[in-house]
Structure formats: C-alpha cells, structure tokens
Image (cartoon, grey):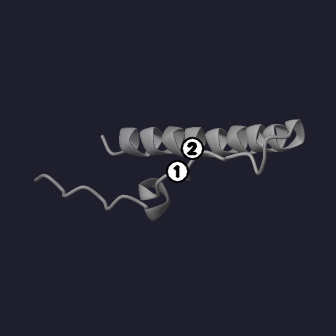
Amino acid sequence: MVEPPRPLPAEYAAQCPPPAEPADNSADAAAVALKELYDQYGLCAGRLVDLVNYLQEQR
C-alpha cells in the first residue's frame, strides 16, 4: 500500500525575502546591505538544504 506524502512543513514553503538594498549611495550603506544580503543568502541556502534533506527522508 502506498502512503500519501506528508504535508510540506510551512518553513520550507516560505519564500526568501527580496535582496537587501542600500539605504543610500554611501559606502557604509553598501557595506550594510551587502552584509544583509549575505545573511539572507545563508538563510535561504540553509532552507534549501533542509528541504532537500526532508525530501530525501521521504523515500
């Protein structure tokens, strides 16, 4: 008998936020936006790894 797949956890279905934008044209604002962008990338990359692991456990 084939079991239906478990529902996808909500945290895996959430979209990544849009890329960070600098507040103005200063170098400081660019550095802050770049740091925020790196943080966003880490969060989204981590979610992708978690999703892949979750789907592989389904097999």
Q: Residue furthest front?
A: 25
Q: Which is nearer the eye, 33 or 27? A: 27
Residue 44: image tag? 2
Q: Which is nearer the eye, 34 or 46? A: 34
Q: Amino acid at mark 1?
A: Cys
SS of the residue at dot 1?
loop
Q: Amino acid at mark 2?
A: Cys
Is 5 displayed left or right of 38 in the figure?
A: left
SS of the residue at dot 2?
helix
Q: Nearer the viewer, mark 2 or mark 1?
A: 1
| 57 lies above or below 13 | above
Is 34 displayed left or right of 59 in the figure?
A: right
Q: Where does the image place residue 54, in percent across and percent down from the top left? A: 43, 46
In the rendered image, which quarter is residue 25 located in? Answer: top right
Could you tell me which residue is drawn at 63 percent across and 39 percent down?
41
Residue 16: image tag? 1
Is 16 displayed left or right of 13 in the figure?
A: right
Is 19 displayed left or right of 51 in the figure?
A: right
